[in-house]
Structures are given as structure tokens and as C-alpha cells.
């Protein structure tokens, strides 16, 4: 392969045309040609200039990248590239050969060039090579030809770039495309440093920020990566991407990226929701951000705006986007059907079309039900919609308020059951919560009757889901308040399928110890309320039960006899009582859920299982500890407190140190003791192969 002359390489800053626009780079059904053309119109209207074609599930973009486009596909792409040009949008064709390319094979490089030459014939003048989300292990042939994965990628990228005539826009996506992927750090990453040193200066590098989905992107973090890459990066922003969770949609504004970033970057491309039409907000607010006035311009931030960016207010940008989106909602230009004939606010003076002109319209008589009349969608409805589907790391204001109110109503439910000084407040807040739930229902109804059905169909699964969830919460609060049982039969032992969140994936997650730990609403705290008390003889059966349960869980379905005994087993099984003041019990609202026991002299327990331990070990660590917690105890704090108290008691007895034995399969307790910091692995002669010893001096 040809190697570029490194002496000509100069650092590149964020000068030149600022790249701004959309990357279609998500996993899932790609957008249609018609939707992409509509996107170009929006970009032109809002002042964006770039579209990066990189749909992961276009198989000729990624999986079968070597295959040339057939005649019909070629015609479609040619038309699409032409449409982009008509709307002053730069069409960047991306290809992802990293799944299976052999970098050192000239035939592979030729296939890549041939594919991009074909796309060039379609009228495309800008290109991108993507090496994201691939295995980093090179094949044997590549290991012989290249000193590292980065060298292999850079060599082929430079060669393709030169072959295409050094396009003005040529983007490279590294495998380590965010800070969290860099080992050991951004500045010390050998991969990124190689890219910075060897990649030709005319090639721009894509970067997602600190993480794949970055909460915030700071000026300092961009300056850091720019110094390594020797050029300003183009941000591939996943803040509105939702391809990793089919239950989430993001309709909040572009935020947590200060406008001070703009002169530090070569560009920003948003990789938004998989659904095309809901991306109105994501793209619109990005366009507002990109057009933010230069530093020193008058402040455009309302008091209380948490960004405190003098040039850009996310809330104002959101309001502008939602106002424009409302017009699109009420438009019938999109395919999907005409305006509902009984909208209160008619969009036209014409009479709705009648299917049977010989029959008079039905008019309800006295005492009969009035005709259903669809309310028109309002800006407040869209603000509520955005609040309910805001951003990955943040709920909107209304969503946070609803969660806080539900939490308070649940925790203060005794005020609804019996007259207390909080009863009136509880009833008032329950009514306010009910009103908020009703607003969600009415929003759903008005969205469902909006004329533009294309937008509705992209939103429908999400708004149905939130309406159902809000309905369950509403019914629960009514039940707490003593109202008649709602039709949802919330507390029924055999509810209808729509009365609970189903799905195998959800059930797996709910069974895991950390389920809910990343919920955006952090109140109440993730931990339960625990009680630590001294051990007493009456606890022996429950302690043994927990011991047997955890022992069985550790062994799986194998026979218990397959496990090597631990010195502490006789302590947990109740065969030997703990030393005085050396036993603690952990309880939660369901009962006993953990224990911490100790023998200040471990020799009798070792003799009981015929474990030969050298005298020097017992001299340094004479005491043994047994600690166990049921899986439902997901907070390590109670266990840390018990260990602290237990070690204090052991020290008071005159012991010099304590140890615990752990099975290698018990990753949970190994991790716990390791993170304590005071316990270290020690060597003991004669230990069974599956047992480790950790000890601490006192």
C-alpha cells in the first residue's frame, strides 16, 4: 500500500465551512427516499448544509459493502444525490467495510475503490469511511502487514482519499470514537495518537464526545481530543438517537453543548431518532444552535436557564421548533389522509365531503349523547409531548413533576386512609396529579385526530405506551384515595395484558438486582430502608436458610457436594455459634435478608472441616468472617456498615487480623471485598482450587 508523506502533514483547526446537518446512522429501518428528500428541504430552510448517508441496515452500506448497486438502486441514489444538490445540501456517502475487510489484501482495497467510484458516478463528491462498532482484533494476515489496527485503518483511508482525488469533504470514523473507548485515556490512547499522526490532514474525524451518547460535551474535552487528532473533530451527536431502546423517543431540544464549541469544531451532525417525522425538534433546534450569534452578542437566555449560554437558550429553541411543528401537524400535505371532518377549527370554509348526499347529517335529540367533536391540537399539547419524551439523561419539567407527585402521594398514603393533618393536602395534590394525567389523555386524543397522519403513525406506539402508563398511575392514586375501583383493575391478581408492562426483555430486566438504578427520577433513593441489629440464637434458622439459599444459588443446578467446604460454613450453618459481640443481622421490610458473623479464633472451625492451615497464617489473621446478603439487597452500604462494626468487635477482642474464604464463582462478594480496600488476597497452602482467601490486618 502507498504510504503518505508525513512531512506534509500540518495541524488542521476548525476553519473553513462548518459542517452542519444530519447523519442517518442508526440501527433499524432506513428512511425512505421521499423522507430523505423532505429532510433536504428542511435543512435548506433552516440553514443546515450536510447529510451523511450511513444507515446501518442498508446492507450494501455495511454488511455487503463490496456489492455494487443494481440499476434500480443506482437510479434511486442518483436521484437522491441530485435532490440534495437542488437544496444546497452536501450528500456524503458513507461506507462501513470494517466488519470483514482484510486491510492487507489489495483485492479488498480495489473492491472498496470500485464501490466508491460507482457512487461517484452517481454525482456524489463527498465520502466517509466508518470503522465504528467493529471487532478490534486483526486477522493474521493484517497483523503481519500492519503494526496496529489504527495503522491498518489509516493506511486504507489515506489511499482511498487520494484515489478519489482528495474530496473537500472526507470523513473518517475511528473505532475509538468517544473518550470512554480510549485506553487508558484520550491523550494516552495509542490508537488515537496514530490516527492523529498518520491520517492525511484533509480528512476530518468523527467523534461522539465523552460517551457514545454524551450527556454534555465541554470545550475542554474537545480541545483535548483535537490536540491528539491534530485537527478539530466533527461531532456525530447521538443525543437524540433512540435505536438502543424501542421504548424511548427524544423530543427535547439540542442542549448541554455550549456555543463556545462552534469555533473549536469542524462541524456537528445529529444522528437522531429512527422515526423520521419526530426528528423535527432535534434537527430544528440543532439548526438554531448552529446559527447562534458570535461570542459577545446580546444575551438570549431567560433567567433560570440552566445552560447560562449567552448565545443560545434550549427552551426558546424548543418553543420555536414546536411552534413550527404544530403547523406541520395541521398540514394535510403529507400522505396519510384528510383532516377529520369534525375538527372544531376547520382548516377550510368548504363543507366536508358527504358520502351520501341524499341523507341529512345526524343531529342528536333531547337527552341523547352529543356528537364527538375532535379538539384541535395545541402548542401546549406539543410542549407536554416534548416533556414526556425529553432527552436520554433528563425528563421534561412536567414529567419530573408527575413523578415527584406520585412519589409523595404514595409515601403519604396514610393521610388518605385516615384523617391526619396532611389529609387535605393529600386530597388536593391527588386532584392535581389527576388533572395532569387527564392532560396526557387529552393530548393523546388531540394527537390522534391531527390531520397529518404520517407524524401520528411515527408517534403512535410511544403515545399509546405513555397513556397506558399514566392511566395505571392514575388508577393507583384513586385506589389509595378510596375511590371506586377503576376499570383497569389495577390491583387484580389476574389483570388484562394491557394492565401491566409486558415483554420478555422487561421481565429479564426487572429480575436483575440493579433494575431501576439508572432511572432519571432519583427520589425516592434507590436503596431500601434497612435495620442492623445484634445476632441472637433465635436467628439461627433464618441465617441457615439464607446460607443454604445462597450456597445453592452459587452451585447452580449441580449437587451441593460438588462445592468445597469453607471454614466459615459451620458458622453460617449454625454448627458453631459466633463469638460474643461478633454477630450482626440485616433486616428489610420483608424480614431477615443478610448477616455478618465472626469467630475470633478460627482454628476450631478449620479443624471441623479438617483444613490444614499453617500456624503463621492464623498468627497474622486468627479470626474468620462470614458475610452473606440476599440478592434483593442491591445497596452495598448496609454490608459495609456491618463489616465495619464486626471488625471493630474483633479488634476489641485482641485479634490481629481477620480473613474470609470465598469461592471464585462468587463474583458479587469478591467484588465487594475488593472495593472495600482493606481486604487483600493472601496465599494459603492446601486450599482447594476453587477457593480464594482475602484478609485484613487490624
Image (spheres, grey):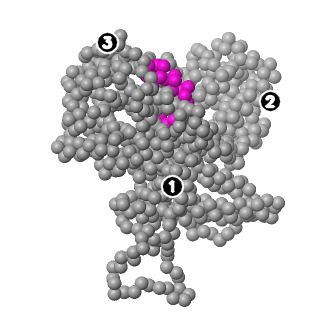
In the foreground, 172 or 556: 172
Taking 255 as reference, is 376 above or below it? Answer: below
Q: Is residue 208 above or below residue 521?
A: above
Label 2 with label 3: CB-CB less than 8 Å:
no
Q: Earlier in the sequence, mark 2 or mark 1?
A: 1
Q: Nearer the viewer, mark 3 or mark 1?
A: 1
Q: Is residue 311 left or right of residue 102?
A: right
**Residue 649 spot, x, y in % from top left:** 79, 26
**x 25%, y 25%: residue:** 165
**In magenta stretch: residue 226:** yes
Q: Which of the two marks, 2 or 1, is nearer to us in this view?
A: 1
Residue located 69% across and 27% down the image:
625
Instruction: Give me the disc on residue 323.
Output: 1
As helix, strand or loop, the secondary structure at mark 1 comes to helix
Q: Residue at x 52, y 39 (%)?
A: 292
Give how far apart the Cα atoms at labels 2 and 1 are.
Answer: 72 Å
How far apart, in angstroms, are the residues tagged by discs 3 and 1?
53 Å
Of the pair 394 and 524, the residue shown nearer to us? 394
SS for dot 3 = loop
The quarter in which the C terminus is drawn is top right
- Residue 387 position, x and y percent, is 56, 52
Q: Which residue is mark 3?
A: 5
- Please state the extent of the stretch shown in magenta in the rendering: 212-234
Amino acid at each position: 500500500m502507498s504510504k503518505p508523506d508525513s512531512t506534509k502533514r500540518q495541524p488542521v483547526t476548525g476553519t473553513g465551512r462548518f459542517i452542519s446537518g444530519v447523519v442517518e446512522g442508526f440501527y433499524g429501518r432506513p428512511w425512505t427516499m421521499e423522507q430523505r428528500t423532505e429532510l433536504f428541504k428542511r435543512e435548506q430552510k433552516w440553514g443546515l448544509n450536510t447529510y451523511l448517508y450511513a444507515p446501518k441496515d442498508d446492507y450494501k452500506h455495511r454488511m455487503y459493502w463490496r456489492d455494487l448497486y443494481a440499476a434500480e438502486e443506482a437510479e434511486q441514489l442518483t436521484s437522491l444525490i441530485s435532490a440534495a444538490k437542488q437544496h444546497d445540501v452536501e450528500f456524503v456517502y458513507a461506507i462501513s467495510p470494517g466488519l470483514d475487510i482484510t486491510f492487507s489484501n489489495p483485492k479488498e482495497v480495489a473492491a472498496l475503490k470500485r464501490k466508491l467510484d460507482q457512487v461517484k458516478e452517481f454525482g456524489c463528491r463527498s465520502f466517509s469511511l466508518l470503522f465504528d462498532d467493529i471487532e478490534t482484533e486483526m486477522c493474521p494476515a493484517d497483523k503481519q502487514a500492519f503494526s496496529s489496527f489504527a495503522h491498518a485503518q489509516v493506511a486504507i483511508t489515506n489511499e482511498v482519499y487520494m484515489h478519489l482525488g482528495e474530496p473537500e469533504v472526507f470523513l473518517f470514523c475511528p473505532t475509538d470514537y468517544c473518550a470512554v473507548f480510549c485506553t487508558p485515556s484520550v491523550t494516552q490512547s495509542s490508537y488515537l495518537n496514530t490516527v492523529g499522526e498518520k491520517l492525511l490532514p484533509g480528512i476530518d474525524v468523527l467523534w461522539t464526545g465523552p460517551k457514545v451518547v454524551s450527556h454534555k460535551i465541554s470545550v475542554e474535552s474537545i480541545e483535548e481530543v483535537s490536540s491528539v487528532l491534530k485537527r478539530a473533530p466533527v461531532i456525530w451527536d447521538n443525543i437524540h438517537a433512540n435505536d438502543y431502546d424501542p421504548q424511548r423517543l427524544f423530543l427535547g431540544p439540542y442542549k448541554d453543548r455550549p456555543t463556545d464549541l462552534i469555533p473549536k469544531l469542524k462541524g456537528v451532525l445529529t444522528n437522531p431518532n429512527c422515526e423520521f417525522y419526530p426528528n423535527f425538534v432535534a434537527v430544528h433546534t440543532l439548526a438554531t444552535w448552529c446559527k447562534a450569534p458570535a461570542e459577545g452578542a446580546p444575551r438570549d437566555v431567560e433567567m433560570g436557564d440552566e445552560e447560562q449560554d449567552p448565545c443560545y437558550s434550549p427552551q426558546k429553541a424548543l418553543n420555536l421548533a414546536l411552534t413550527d411543528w404544530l403547523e406541520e401537524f395541521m398540514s394535510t400535505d403529507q400522505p396519510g389522509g384528510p383532516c377529520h371532518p369534525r375538527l372544531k377549527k376547520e382548516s377550510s370554509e368548504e363543507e366536508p365531503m358527504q358520502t351520501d348526499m341524499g341523507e341529512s347529517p345526524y343531529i342528536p335529540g333531547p337527552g341523547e349523547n352529543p356528537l364527538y367533536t375532535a379538539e384541535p391540537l395545541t402548542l401546549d399539547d406539543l410542549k407536554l409531548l416534548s416533556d414526556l419524551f425529553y432527552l436520554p439523561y433528563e425528563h421534561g419539567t412536567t414529567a419530573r413533576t408527575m413523578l415527584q407527585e406520585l412519589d409523595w402521594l404514595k409515601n403519604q398514603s396514610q393521610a388518605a386512609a385516615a384523617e391526619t393533618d396532611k389529609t387535605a393536602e393529600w386530597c388536593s395534590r391527588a386532584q392535581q396529579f389527576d388533572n395532569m394525567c387527564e392532560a396526557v389523555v387529552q393530548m393523546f386524543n388531540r394527537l390522534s385526530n391531527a390531520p397529518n397522519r404520517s407524524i401520528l403513525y411515527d408517534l403512535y406506539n410511544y403515545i399509546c405506551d405513555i397513556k397506558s402508563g399514566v392511566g395505571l398511575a392514575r388508577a393507583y392514586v384513586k385506589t389509595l384515595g378510596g375511590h371506586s375501583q377503576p376499570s383497569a383493575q389495577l390491583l387484580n391478581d389476574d389483570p388484562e395484558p394491557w394492565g401491566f408492562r409486558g415483554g420478555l426483555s422487561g421481565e429479564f430486566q426487572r429480575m436483575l438486582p440493579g433494575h431501576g438504578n439508572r432511572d432519571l427520577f432519583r427520589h425516592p433513593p434507590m436503596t431500601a430502608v434497612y435495620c442492623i441489629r445484634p445476632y441472637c440464637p433465635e436467628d439461627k434458622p433464618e441465617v441457615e436458610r439464607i446460607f443454604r439459599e445462597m450456597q445453592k444459588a452459587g452451585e447452580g443446578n449441580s449437587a451441593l457436594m460438588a462445592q468445597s467446604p469453607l471454614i466459615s460454613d459451620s458458622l453460617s450453618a449454625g454448627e458453631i455459634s459466633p463469638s460474643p459481640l461478633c454477630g450482626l443481622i440485616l433486616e428489610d421490610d420483608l424480614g431477615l435478608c443478610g448477616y455478618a458473623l465472626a469467630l475470633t479464633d478460627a482454628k476450631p472451625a478449620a479443624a471441623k472441616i479438617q483444613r490444614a492451615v499453617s500456624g503463621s497464617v492464623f498468627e497474622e489473621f486468627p479470626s474468620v468472617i462470614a458475610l452473606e446478603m440476599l440478592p434483593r439487597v442491591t445497596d452495598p452500604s448496609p454490608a459495609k456498615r456491618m463489616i465495619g462494626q464486626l471488625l471493630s468487635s474483633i479488634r476489641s477482642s485482641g485479634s490481629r487480623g481477620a480473613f474470609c474464604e470465598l469461592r471464585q464463582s462468587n463474583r458479587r462478594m469478591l467484588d465487594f471485598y475488593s472495593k472495600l480496600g482493606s481486604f487483600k488476597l493472601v496465599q494459603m497452602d492446601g486450599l482447594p482450587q476453587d477457593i480464594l482467601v482475602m484478609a485484613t490486618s487490624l
